[in-house]
Amino acid sequence: MKREISAGIIVYRRTEDGLRFLILYHRGRYWNFPKGKIESEEKSLAAAIRETKEETGLGVHDLRLIRDFKAHERYYFRKENQPVYKIVIFYLAETRRADIKLSHEHNGYGWFLLNDARRILGGYRASQKILKQAHDLIRQKSTRGREPHSAR
């Protein structure tokens, strides 16, 4: 069975309404976080930063990485009628930028509060679970007053 490994970043920003998470819109009803395949000899964090830059225009200087968050999503899908086992490694980063420069791969995006983001992610329960873990960590860090570290 073919195996694919990707990496991405769950990007969030603080607003008056609360934490808002960036979710990209693909064709059909598919929404998800910025992510993409890890290239040969590339580390997962470098791939996540590269893919986020390519898909959103948010670069390393726009992101503040939360260093103690790393989550894995695993699932199966079919590609060219062949089963594929996919692993996605997600990191978490804060940004202050609301403007996004979408790549040609996407049709739209949104900044969503937690409950709306979970609804938008639809049947992707693993993505919903990882989003909730990210949200809980951000809240926990906020109550302790710890600042996230820069991705630089």
Image (cartoon, rainbow, N blue to C red):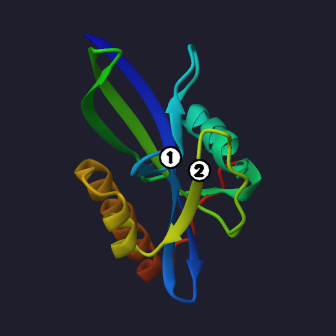
Is 54 situated left or right of 116 in this image?
Answer: right
Q: Which residue is mark 1?
A: 26
Residue at the far front: name it.
Answer: 28
In the rendered image, residue 64, in percent from the top left (x then y), is placed at 63, 59
In the rendered image, residue 132, in percent from the top left (x then y), is placed at 31, 64
Q: Given the image, on which type of amino acid does mark 2 rest? A: Asn
Residue at the far right: name it.
Answer: 61
Q: Given the image, on which type of amino acid does mark 1 rest? A: His
Label 2 sits on a secondary structure element that is loop
> Label 2 vs label 1: CA separation?
6 Å
Residue drawn at x 57%, y 15% is 41
Q: Which residue is mark 2?
A: 107
Q: 117 above or below 23?
A: below
Q: Which of the two discs, 2 and 1, labels the residue nearer the N terminus?
A: 1
Is 37 situated left or right of 69 in this image?
Answer: right
Residue drawn at x 53%, y 46% is 34
Q: How many marks?
A: 2
In the rendered image, residue 122, in percent from the top left (x then y), is placed at 29, 57
